[in-house]
Amino acid sequence: MAKKPFLRRYFEDSRYSEWRWAYIFLGVDLAWAGLFLFFPLALALIFSFQEFSLANIGDVRFIGFDNYIEILTDVRGWWHSVKITAIWTFFTVPVNVAIAMGLSLLIARLPDGPANFFKGAFYLPAVVSQVVLSVIMVWIFSPRSGLANMILTSIGLPPQRWYASPEMALFTLMLMAWLTGHGFGVLLYTAALKRIPNSLYEAADIDSTPAWKKFWNITWPLIKPTTLYVTIIQLIASFQTFAGAFFITKGGPLRSTEFLNWRIYETFYTEGNFGMASAMAVILMIFIMIISIASFRMLGTDVEY
């Protein structure tokens, strides 16, 4: 009689306990989250109530809510960064959700082979290093010899300064987000569209229902939970945006791309003011929590799971 493999014999053993292994695997996740999520969060909360900077690193003092008061009274230029981030969020989140939905509607009509190719192509920017992606975007929107200016001049339009201009820097970063920020949404939407039964569309075809009515009465209600999820993920990501300001514009020119995360980075690394940066990070976390809950309540009122 052939001997069973070790793992099969182990899991068939009566001493094997599913509960024990469940606790082991959960324990690994909890330890990871505790070390890299809850512990830094607790430290940030503690630092936010302290005067803790490189200038007085040997004299850390508890100062209560002074850091928060200084931030919210705009001594640190906080509300300018809030305004920049809010404009960014308003113009990138709805557009990226709409682009992802539109691309998915087109991809869902294709055979499996081409559909998988386009899903991989649109998701590629999400797995490419932000450094590499920023280098590509800098080349495309270079004010001197970029691809974007070559296209403009070829059709008789004047070249633009793109991210080197205070008036256009934020818009240029938005263009980059519109070009690269919808791969995750495409994957979710195509999966949601595949789950819609064809019988619903066939019944609508029998009644000669127009295409826009089929979308409004069949497709939209059935992909609304996906829309809710994609929108909230995009909202959270937009408030955490940092790569464009760090790799391309450095928050400029003239503070035109000074996002909240860039403001926190400057306060922490350039000014060495750890207590103030921690307070800013805590306020940003509260912002994201409030906006996520409000979005869920507004968009998820008639969503069925």
Image: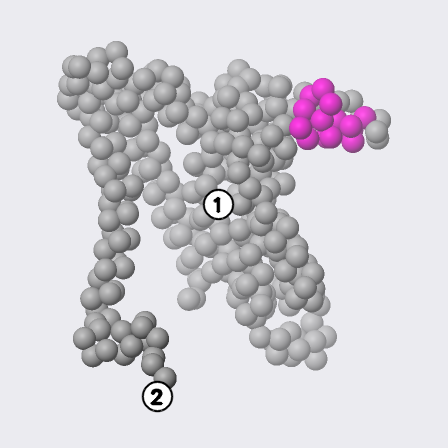
User: Image quarter for residue 198?
Assistant: bottom right
Q: Nearer the viewer, mark 2 or mark 1?
A: 2
Residue 55, position in %: x, y? 25, 11
- On residue 1, the disc is 2
- Report x, y in % for residue 216: 60, 63
Q: Which residues are magenta?
A: 139-153
Mark 2: secondary structure: loop
Q: Nearer the viewer, residue 16 or 165?
A: 16
Q: Which residue is mark 1?
A: 234
* Image position of 161 (left or right of 94): right
Query: Could you tell me which residue is drawn at 42 percent across and 66 percent down?
Result: 305
Q: Quadrant of the N terminus?
A: bottom left
On screen, 57 above or below 298? above
Establish if 297 lies above or below 2: above
Give, as a three-letter code, the residue at label 1: Gln
Residue lying furthest front: 1
Q: Toward which corner of the image does residue 73 lie, by quadrant?
A: top left
